[in-house]
Amino acid sequence: MTKNIAQPSVERSFCPIACALDELGDKWTLLIIRDLLLGKKRFQEFLASPEHIATNILADRLKKLESAGFITQQAYQQKPLRYQYDLTQKGKDLGPVLQAFVNWGKIYYPNSQVLKPTV
Amino acid sequence: MTKNIAQPSVERSFCPIACALDELGDKWTLLIIRDLLLGKKRFQEFLASPEHIATNILADRLKKLESAGFITQQAYQQKPLRYQYDLTQKGKDLGPVLQAFVNWGKIYYPNSQVLKPTV
DNA sequence: AAAAGTAACTTGTATAATGCAAGTTATATT
DNA sequence: AATATAACTTGCATTATACAAGTTACTTTT
């Protein structure tokens, strides 16, 4: 079960890298940020990414990303109620971090391919 | 217990970010890379970092980093046998990724402080 | 010479995170 | 009425992480 929404409450150190990894250091969170930067906004769009995140993990990460101020959730229609997620400035500013990963990854995973922006 | 040394064997997708996170996407691995970039080389030096990694996790990550080609292990003395770890080019090339985290983290964690190089 | 210390780990155990399948709620479509 | 869709939640098994303690092979201190 995935029931904790509370954040770690104390960071491990004052190092900015450690602080960042406290919030982003897992196998999925930065991939959701990647999808958002590429234009995806909805639950089903994230699920459709090639890594196939599980629905419980996705729901958990969206909650944590929202409570940590990386994204906002808002309804884009009322009947039926449907939500979309948008990056805050804090989230958008991770662009250079992901670009650094891409630059590095293209060298060390020669078969890899950068995903095309949605839209 | 931490007994698996084998790598995931299949990457989740062809995305270079996903490939990178397959090897680096956890709370500790990039902090060890950070320490190595700052000049640390020995088990006890990594343990002394302010985040206080557990010894079993550190031993596990050093093995995984070596088998993934990020670091090399070599004895720096024989009696008693002691090892040091050095970054390969693949590991050193993560410098810009960590710098991007630092640049971002300094903005969003105003109390954070960049660690000084060891030496 | 015995006791204590140090580096680099390993082992045990408890808690937390992840993965997979299935179920839920509220509509819309056929 | 039956099926479909979006956005989740729930259960359960597997894997990862945290913390404490133990191990091995020396070196240093008393």
Image: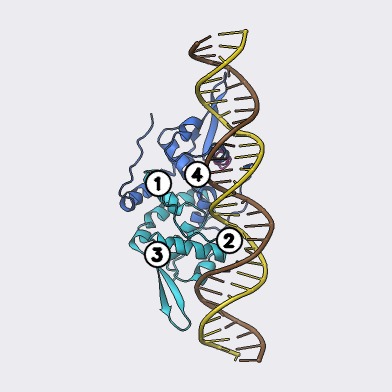
Chain colours: A cyan, B blue, C yellow, D brown
For discs 1 and 2, the disc positioned in front in the rendered view: 2
Structural distance between the alpha carbons of marks 4 and 1: 11 Å
Q: Amino acid at mark 4?
A: Thr
Structural distance between the alpha carbons of marks 4 and 3: 25 Å
Structural distance between the alpha carbons of marks 2 and 3: 23 Å
The residue singled out by tag 4 in the image is B29
Residue at image position (40%, 59%) is: A68
The residue singled out by tag 1 in the image is A17
What is the secondary structure assignment of the residue under circle 1?
helix
Q: Chain of mark 4?
A: B
Both marks 4 and 2 on one chain: no
Q: Amino acid at mark 3?
A: Ile
Question: Does residue B115 appear to the left or right of B76 in the view shown?
Answer: left
Q: Position of residue B40 (x, y in %)?
A: 44, 32
Magenta region: B64-69
Both marks 4 and 1 on one chain: no
* Residue A71 - label: 3
Cβ atoms under marks 1 and 3 closer than 8 Å: no
Q: Amino acid at mark 1?
A: Ile
Which label's residue is closer to the chain start, 1 or 3? 1
* Residue A1 - label: 2
Question: Does residue C13 appear to the left or right of B46 in the view shown?
Answer: right
Both marks 1 and 3 on one chain: yes
